Image (cartoon, rainbow, N blue to C red):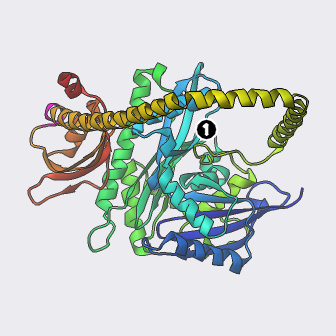
């Protein structure tokens, strides 16, 4: 078997990591060799043009191939979903998925880049399709595509960043290679913290949130503990929902039983034990069952020091996606984007050319008839020109009126949503809760900050409300000098009792 190369490029807010991997004839880790490694940093305010030039220089300096390039996008800008849909054909599954996401995220499909995968039949129940999806704002994805364009990179695949890590875990973690076992992965950086649960079915749960960093630049481990406890609570809630109503959920949540946790963090060795204990206690695990990402043996050609660098494991997993070592990844597609050239396109062009020549022959033999018909149509259009001009004016007027109606309708919906929010808040939230900051955009709560005597009681009340159940914690929960717990939430709000009463 001929050797095959692939390149994984991990893009992050603070920098990038590049790995060129060559697969020899053997399968598995022993058949992989890293032939190029490069990485660098940039500031958050670095322009796309400057970032592109940095990457262009790295490819040129290291003589890295531009074939088989797989690029990651930071997870914090996207949203992971896993849902059960009726058993449908593949085109209808995508239509149903987009409709479901549009209702849940309040964004039209034209605004989203989408990666999705239908799980195998043995995962979902009979007559149902279990679909895993990652939704990315198309505007944010376009910014990263611009960076790659500035770097002179034209042919590449885009993957949400968690699938780079998941690919390597699924291929080489002994815990995941055993049937039925699941592991947590916790990746901490100065910008973002990711928590995801992995099983043989791929990613089973994913959360990404801004890293809780104090004003002096210290990572807040107490806030991390609260976030991990919340993750555990959400998994337990989903598992309970499966037990209560098996017809509406798959057997997936019945098997949530992690045996191990992997951790990646920028902490010094002296702080590593405290971080490991925080992760273990918050997830309800033995500290001895927590190890760093670097405990996974690196592929040949990469030193231990390089393997421990941020993004190295992710970039290796991205390369595995192209080499076909694992089927975990889901490549992002964009609305209206054409498929790459192939045989089907060749046959389509052949049919078009055949149709063109047949049409040209028909025109040649019937030229005289077409000329007479064209003259008749020209005269008829000239007679109808005054009426057509009047119709165009009426259509333009109608279009302007429709735009005004749409504007007034939007304003009315926003006003109604604000009053619905207040009504449902008064009904659902425990007494003693104080709102300090509230920012609403359409049906989205951009930011909701406040203070409450007990955040656990407060959050349980939100989860019990159909209107507020989709609000997510943005930052860690802290306690102010008055003993009240300070919270920050955001997310879409749905229809609740307050809206029904308003009607």
139 lies above or below 149: above
* Residue of label 1: 117
> Is residue 380 found left or right of 324 in the rendered image?
left
Dominant secondary structure of the residues highlighted in magenta in the image: helix
- Quarter of the image for the C terminus: give it: top left
Q: Residue 477 appears at what percent x and percent y?
A: 25, 54
Which region of the structure is painted magenta?
Answer: 425-430
> Is residue 195 found left or right of 324 in the rendered image?
left
Can residue 309 be seen?
no
What element does badge 1 sit on? strand
Name which residue lies at 31% across and 37% down: 404
Q: Residue 157 appears at what percent x and percent y?
A: 65, 54
- Quarter of the image for the N terminus: give it: bottom right
Name which residue lies at 37% across and 39% down: 234
> Is residue 495 found left or right of 208 in the rendered image?
left
203 lies above or below 354: below
Can residue 328 be seen?
yes
* Disc 1: CA contacts within 10 A as few (<14), some (14-19) or many (>=20): some
């Amino acid at each position: 078997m001929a050797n095959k190369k692939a390149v994984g490029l991990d893009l992050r807010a603070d920098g990038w990591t590049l790995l060129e991997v060559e697969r020899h004839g053997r399968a598995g880790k022993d058949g992989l060799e890293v032939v190029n490694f490069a990485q660098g940093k940039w500031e958050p305010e670095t322009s796309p043009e400057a970032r592109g030039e940095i990457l262009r220089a790295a490819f040129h300096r290291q003589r890295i191939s531009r074939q088989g390039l797989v690029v990651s996008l930071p997870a914090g800008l996207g949203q992971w979903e896993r849902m059960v849909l009726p058993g449908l054909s593949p085109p209808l599954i995508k239509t149903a998925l987009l409709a479901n996401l549009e209702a849940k995220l309040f964004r039209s499909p034209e605004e989203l880049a989408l990666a999705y995968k239908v799980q195998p039949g043995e995962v979902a129940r009979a007559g149902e399709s279990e679909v895993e999806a990652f939704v990315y704002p198309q505007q944010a994805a376009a910014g990263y595509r611009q960076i790659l364009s500035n770097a002179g990179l034209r042919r590449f695949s885009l993957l949400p960043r968690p699938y780079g890590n998941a690919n390597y875990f699924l291929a080489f973690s002994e815990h995941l290679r055993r049937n039925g076992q699941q592991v947590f992965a916790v990746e901490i950086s100065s910008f973002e913290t990711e928590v995801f649960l992995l099983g043989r079915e791929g990613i089973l749960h994913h959360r990404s949130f801004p890293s809780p960093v104090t004003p002096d630049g210290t990572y807040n481990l107490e806030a991390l503990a609260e976030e991990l406890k919340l993750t555990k609570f959400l998994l337990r809630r989903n598992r309970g929902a499966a037990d209560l109503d098996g017809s509406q959920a798959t057997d997936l949540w019945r098997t949530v039983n992690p045996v191990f946790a992997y951790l990646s963090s920028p902490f010094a060795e002296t702080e590593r034990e405290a971080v490991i204990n925080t992760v273990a206690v918050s997830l309800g695990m033995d500290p001895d069952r927590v190890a760093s990402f670097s405990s996974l043996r690196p592929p040949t050609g990469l030193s231990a020091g390089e393997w421990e660098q941020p993004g190295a494991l992710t970039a290796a997993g991205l390369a595995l996606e192209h080499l076909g070592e694992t089927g975990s990844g889901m490549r992002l597609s964009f609305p209206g984007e054409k498929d790459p050239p192939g045989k089907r396109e060749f046959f389509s062009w052949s049919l078009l050319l055949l149709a063109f020549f047949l049409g040209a022959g028909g025109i040649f033999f019937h030229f005289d008839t077409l000329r007479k018909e064209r003259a008749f149509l020209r005269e008829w259009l000239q007679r109808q020109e005054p009426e057509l001009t009047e119709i165009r004016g009426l259509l333009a007027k109608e279009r302007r009126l429709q735009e005004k109606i749409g504007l007034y309708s939007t304003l009315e919906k926003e006003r109604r949503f604000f009053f619905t929010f207040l009504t449902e808040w008064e009904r659902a939230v425990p007494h003693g809760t104080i709102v300090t900051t509230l920012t609403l955009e359409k049906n989205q709560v951009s930011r909701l900050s406040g203070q409450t005597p007990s955040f656990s009681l407060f959050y349980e009340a939100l989860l019990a409300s159909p209107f507020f159940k989709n609000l997510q914690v943005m930052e860690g929960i802290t306690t102010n000098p008055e003993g009240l717990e300070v919270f920050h939430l955001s997310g879409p709000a749905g229809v609740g009792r307050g809206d029904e009463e308003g009607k």
